[in-house]
Image (cartoon, helix red, strand yellow):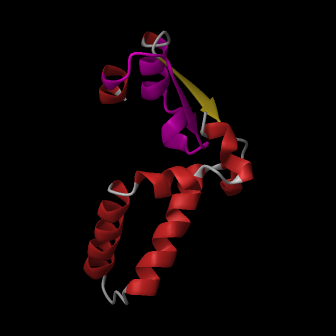
Amino acid sequence: LKRLIRQLDRKIHLIADRHPVHRARLLKDWLARHHDRIEMHFLPGYCPELNPVELLNGDIKHHVTATTSPRTKSELAAATRTHLRRRQNQPDHVRALFGKEEVRYAAD
């Protein structure tokens, strides 16, 4: 988060799920100290369809299992890293994930 607020010159509205780490006291205290630079908004309780990260997770699962057959954790990790590196060079593809009607709120 420190790096994120340093890189952008406008207030950031961070959308997060309700995982306990996103609601930890340490994070709440940090956000309170930086309220002028960043604000956190929470998704409803259980709604993976509203979470753009879940769309990326689905993309990873689909392509990693379609193009490789990892048999060990290390093979799975390597195939996942390779796919994510590919996606880093395809920002239009990642941006397209935000075109889904349920997550268009996050595209603006």
Up/down of 15 relative to 48, above or below: above
Instruction: Decide which of 53, 88 is in the foreground and name it.
Output: 88
Q: Position of residue 101 (x, y in %)?
A: 74, 51
- Residue shown at 49% from the left, 74% from the top: 61
Instruction: Decide which of 94, 82 is in the foreground and name it.
Output: 94
Q: In screen coordinates, is 60 left or right of 23?
A: left
Q: Is residue 46 visible?
A: no
Q: Position of residue 104 (x, y in %)?
A: 68, 43
Q: Quadrant of residue 89?
A: bottom left
Up/down of 66 relative to 31, above or below: below
Q: How many marks?
A: 0
Q: Is residue 49 visible?
A: yes
Tell me the magenta residue range: 7-32
- Quarter of the image with the C terminus is top right
Q: Position of residue 88 (x, y in %)?
A: 34, 55
Q: Quadrant of residue 87?
A: bottom left
- Residue shown at 60% from the left, 43% from the top: 17
Q: In screen coordinates, is 32 left or right of 107?
A: left
Q: In screen coordinates, is 22 left or right of 18?
A: left
- Quarter of the image with the N terminus is top left
Q: Is residue 99 magenta?
A: no
- Residue shown at 46% from the left, 53% from the top: 92
Which residue is farthest front? 92
- Residue shown at 31% from the left, 76% from the top: 79
